[in-house]
């Protein structure tokens, strides 16, 4: 199974890494590792997370983020690396 990030989701990931790294050295790398672990959990069991507004959301450990994704034809399409306490519906325009 493969996955691809929406360009805006990739930018959100990079922004999150930069933000946490500014807060504390090494914390950005921890954030990146948690996102990677979440993506690996999605790949292992893509139907395990609940459907919210037409997409699935897997929660990230240690950080207030969720990975929103679609699953079709053995492909994971990551729509957003979303902070859970900010602008909840902004990603809707990314849905194919």
Image (cartoon, helix red, strand yellow):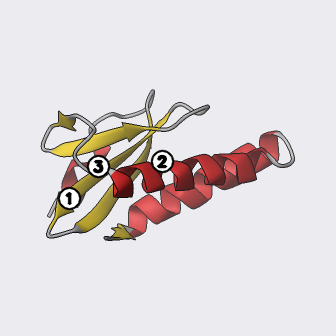
89 with respect to 64 (left or right)? left
Q: Position of residue 74 (x, y in %)?
A: 21, 68
In the rendered view, tell whether residue 8 sits above or below residue 69. below
10 Å neighbourhood of mark 3: few (<14), some, or many (≥20)?
some
| Residue positioned most to the top | 85
| Residue at 44 percent of width and 55 percent of height | 39
10 Å neighbourhood of mark 2: few (<14), some, or many (≥20)?
some
Tell me the distance, in whole angstroms, between the alpha carbons under discs 1 and 2.
Answer: 15 Å
29 with respect to 47 (left or right)? right
Please tell me whether mark 1 sits on a helix, a strand or a loop. strand
What residue sits right under mark 1 in the picture?
71
Residue 50 shows which numbered tag? none
Q: Position of residue 37 (x, y in %)?
A: 54, 50
Q: Position of residue 44 (x, y in %)?
A: 36, 54
What residue sits right under mark 2 in the picture?
38
Q: Quadrant of residue 14?
A: bottom right
Please tell me whether mark 3 sits on a helix, a strand or a loop. helix
Of discs 3 and 1, which sits in the foreground?
Answer: 1
10 Å neighbourhood of mark 1: few (<14), some, or many (≥20)?
some
């Amino acid at each position: 199974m493969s996955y691809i990030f929406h360009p805006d989701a990739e930018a959100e990931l990079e922004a999150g890494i930069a933000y946490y790294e500014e807060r504390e050295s090494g914390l950005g790398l921890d954030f990146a590792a948690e996102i990677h672990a979440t993506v690996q959990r999605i790949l292992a069991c893509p139907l395990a997370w609940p459907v919210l507004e037409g997409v699935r959301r897997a929660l990230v450990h240690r950080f207030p983020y969720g990975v929103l994704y679609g699953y079709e034809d053995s492909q994971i399409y990551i729509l957003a690396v979303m902070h859970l306490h900010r602008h909840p519906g902004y990603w809707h325009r990314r849905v194919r």
